[in-house]
Structures are given as structure tokens and as C-alpha cells.
Amino acid sequence: MNIPLWQLKKQMCDIGHRIWLRGFCAGNEGNHSIRIGEDRVLCTPTGISKGFLEPDDLCVVDLEGNQVEANPKGRNRTSEVLVHLAIYKKQPTVRAVIHSHPPHAVAFCLANMPLPEGIHPEAEVFLGRTIFAKYATPGGPDLPASFIDRINEQTTTILMANHGSVSLGADLTDAYYKLEILDNYCKQLILAKQLGQVNVLNDEQMVELLKVKERFGFPDERLGCAAEGCVGPANEAFLTTFGVQPMSACCNGQGDVNRSAATSADGDAAFERMVQTITDQIMAGSPN
Ligand SMILES: [Zn+2]
């Protein structure tokens, strides 16, 4: 599918506006890009709010970061494009990247806390296992080096310690949805902390969920080992640092009651919601 460049530039501006409206980036923060060719990437310039982008603000670079076309407004490419380029080189299926500072997700970056797993079906299906990268100076060469080796075709999201998020997608809308889902998931976790307990899906429920995910065309490497409890290595840190009790540790076996009740009826409802979400996303992303 060959989308004209003017249309991609318009999409870059529209998504930038959404990012700004949602409060994912303050001031001139953040940057996003689309891979438009074998050795060409369309990216945002440095020093401008993502809420006020115009098509002529956008810059074209090669995979080494050289600006290969004169910008009509004399704009220079974002200094953080090196992160985007490292990802495009490592994983050719990625066609769009958004780096952002979504507040709820950044809270996890500041707390140095990887995201827990096996808690929310939508997060599992659309984000899967996220990468948590140790701190590196923004804009510097060590930043991509802090996570690039761990990226594979299933990677959707990277959290960078004390900094922000990186969302990957098959196109810019896809990457943007990953960003929204990420911040929403983190917000839900922070709200759950206030309630004091979190019900963690058991291995059997995770296997079933990951099978549903696979049927939707999103294979997940954890399916091979979820039955042995490989899912959720980050959960202990989340549950203890947050001071949240897992349901199984709750009084009077209440957690177990809730777990056994969360079988077919809840599963069907979750499945329905997932189908609806995917349908909505496909409709929202389809050209008209
Ligand atoms: Zn940043």
C-alpha cells in the first residue's frame, strides 16, 4: 500500500495533535517518525510542540540520521531520531515509532518499575511483554544501546528509566494506539494501588488469553511457557513496592473464590470487549 507523502505528513501532524491534546508531551517534548522508504524516514523537527506541527515542519532523514532534503522552514530533525533509526534497522517490520512522556507510564519509569503482567487482558493482547531499559542520557548514543538487543517482532513498547516511552507500530496509528493503551494501563494500575489489591490472572487464565491473542494474529512468545508460570517476572516488584496484595494472599480465600468465578462468563465478556476494541481500531485505522 503506497500512501502519498502529503498524506503521511498530514497524519504526522494529526497524531502530533492527539499526543499533545492527551497531555502525553509538554512543551516541545517527544518525537515521532514514519519509515517512508528503504533508507528514508519522515520525522518531527526539534524545538516545536507536537500540537502545532505543520507538514512543512517535518524532516526527511536517512537511516544514519543525515537530513537528506532541505526543510522548507529551515527546521532541523529531532536529536532523538537516533532511537527511532536504531529500531528501524533492528526490526524492519516496524514502520512507525513514537517517543513520548505519557505521565502515568513515566511514573513507572521514575519508579524504575517494569510493568507487571497477567493483570489486564487488553494490555496483554495489545502491548504484550514490555521492555524496561536502564537509564541513559536522552539524545545520546547509549540510549538505543540500553534496549536495542531485546527488540524483536513482538515488541510494542519500551519504557526508559527516568525518561519516557517508545511505542512501535506497523503504521503511525498503530504506534499511537500502543501509546494510548500503555498510559491507560499504567493509570489503571495506579488506581488499583489505591484500592489496595490486584487480582493476578493464574497460569491457566494466561494460557487461555495468549491463545486468544494468537488467534487474532498476534503470536506471543510467552504462550510456550505460560503454563509453567514464566509470565509475570516483574509482578513481585510491582506488588511489593506498590504495597498491593495479590488476591491469592487475601483473607478468607476470597481471592480463590474470585478466581474460580472468573471463568466462562468473565472470559466471554473479556473476549467480546477485545473483539470490539480490535474492530474499533481497524475501523479507525482504515482509509476512507
Ligand atoms: Zn524524551
Image (cartoon, rainbow, N blue to C red):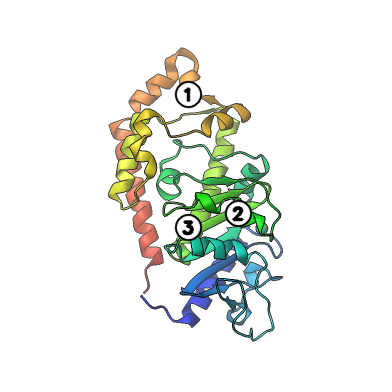
Q: Residue furthest top?
A: 252
Quarter holding the C terminus?
bottom left
- State the mark number for residue 145: 2
Residue 261, image quadrant: top left
93 up-or-down from 2: above or below:
above
Question: How far apart are the alpha carbons under marks 3 and 2?
Answer: 25 Å
How far across and how far down the image is residue 73, in percent? 67, 84
271 up-or-down from 53: above or below:
above
287 up-or-down from 166: above or below:
below
Image quarter for ligand 1: bottom right
Residue kind at label 2, given as amino acid type? Ala
Callout 1: SS: helix
Identify residue for label 3: 177
Tell me what residue is drawn at x 37 percent, y 58 percent. 280
Q: Nearer the viewer, residue 79 or 13?
A: 79
193 up-or-down from 173: above or below:
above
How far across and how far down the image is residue 241, in percent? 62, 29
Residue kind at label 1, given as amino acid type? Met
Estimate how packed mark 2 is, as few (under 14), some (14 to 19) or many (20 or more) residues with alpha carbons within 10 Å: some
Q: Nearer the viewer, residue 250 or 163?
A: 163
Q: Is residue 39 visible?
A: yes
How far across and how far down the image is residue 194, in percent? 60, 32
How far across and how far down the image is residue 66, in percent? 62, 76
Q: Is residue 22 visible?
A: no
Q: Nearer the viewer, residue 252 or 87?
A: 87
